[in-house]
Image: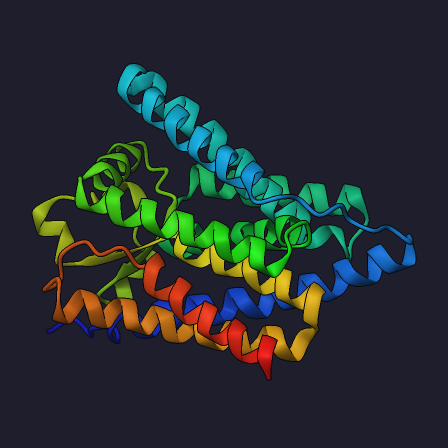
């Protein structure tokens, strides 16, 4: 019997971005209500801090992947991801549940990922974590600051893919079952596979899975939250729509120009998001 194939990866990637936007809007509304009720005015961070923070993090991860033995690396990365995914769930629930309840659910969710790393669970928890990152950090950046940040990261994305650094990092991270990306199976049944069985970057496996970088979802979410607090829901929704068009453009570029090879997705997402912001800024 022939396996039932899933839709084109863009459809599933688009759904991931749409769901993450719905979640980040829901969290942003709760965050806005909390800040207003507590009369808190978040400080505005200059673009230099997130850029320095990002590149220091990339450099540290690179050194760790190169120096730390594989067995120890697995333990370190699993611990980091356990904290990240648990933190994401805690933040997402923290606005609506008591702290002990949110913490309990977060720990259970992270433990499930640790002992039952199914692809659907990995993708779900990563989505929640990225929405939480967007909610927490987007409020501290002005829209133009977030745009400059994304432009700098887009240049990095192009260079990292061009010179192989991105694929080297992802291959080393995937060995430890801690891939900071969404895994999109080409079959329906693939969604219930164990992440540890995928071996994403083997030649045979590459025909069965595609990968969408977490940053391609996370960074647009930061911009959307930034626009939400600066210009309101409706205008941030426009920017979110253009980021979705940017994701479609990234898949078109991969298919037509790169012939399916690894493609930096952040540049077209950033450029279309900027177009969306310019429209709501000047209209």
x%, y% of residue 40? 86, 50
**How many marks are shown on the rendered structure?**
0
Viewer-side residue, 46 vs 166: 46
Placement of 52 over or under 23, stated as above or below: above
Q: Is residue 82 above or below residue 45?
A: above
- Identified at 26% across, 50% down, the residue is 158
Q: Quadrant of the C terminus?
A: bottom right
**How was the colour assigned to the protein in this rendering?**
rainbow
Give x and y (percent) for residue 194: 31, 47
User: Is residue 61 at all visible to an observer of this figure?
Assistant: yes
Residue 36, image x, y percentages: 87, 59
Outermost front residue: 282
Q: Residue 123, how many percent across, how many down?
A: 42, 55
Residue 37 appears left or right of 205: right
Q: Is residue 5 left or right of residue 194?
A: left
Q: In this view of the protein, which residue sits in the foreground, 281 or 99?
A: 281
Question: Residue extending furthest bottom?
Answer: 283
At 35% across and 57% down in the image, what residue appears? 266
Q: Is residue 125 left or right of residue 158?
A: right
| Quadrant (top left/top right/bottom left/bottom right) for the N terminus | bottom left
- 232 left or right of 159 in image: right
- Answer above or below: position of 243 versus 83: below
State whether residue 126 appears in this view. Answer: no
């Amino acid at each position: 019997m022939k396996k039932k194939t899933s839709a084109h990866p863009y459809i599933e990637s688009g759904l991931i971005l749409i769901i993450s936007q719905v979640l980040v809007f829901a969290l942003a509304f709760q965050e806005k209500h909390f800040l207003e009720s507590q009369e808190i005015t978040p400080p505005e961070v200059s673009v230099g801090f997130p850029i320095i923070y990002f590149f220091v993090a990339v450099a540290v991860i690179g050194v760790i992947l190169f120096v730390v033995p594989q067995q120890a690396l697995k333990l370190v990365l699993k611990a980091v991801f356990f904290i990240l995914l648990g933190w994401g769930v805690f933040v997402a629930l923290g606005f609506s549940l008591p702290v002990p309840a949110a913490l309990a659910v977060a720990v259970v969710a992270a433990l499930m990922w640790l002992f039952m790393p199914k692809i659907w669970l990995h993708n779900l928890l990563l989505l929640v974590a990225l929405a939480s990152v967007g909610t927490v950090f987007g409020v501290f950046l002005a829209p133009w600051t977030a745009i400059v940040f994304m432009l700098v990261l887009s240049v990095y994305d192009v260079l990292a893919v061009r010179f192989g650094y991105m694929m080297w990092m992802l291959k080393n991270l995937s060995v430890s079952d801690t891939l900071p990306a969404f895994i999109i199976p080409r079959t329906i049944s693939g969604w219930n596979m164990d992440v540890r069985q995928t071996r994403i970057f083997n030649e045979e496996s590459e025909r069965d899975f595609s990968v969408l970088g977490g940053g391609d979802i996370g960074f647009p979410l930061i911009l959307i939250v930034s626009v939400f607090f600066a210009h309101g829901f409706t205008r941030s929704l426009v920017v979110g729509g253009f980021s979705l068009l940017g994701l479609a453009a990234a898949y078109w570029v991969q298919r037509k120009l790169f012939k399916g090879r690894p493609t930096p997705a952040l540049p077209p997402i950033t450029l279309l998001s900027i177009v969306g912001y310019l429209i709501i800024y000047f209209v």
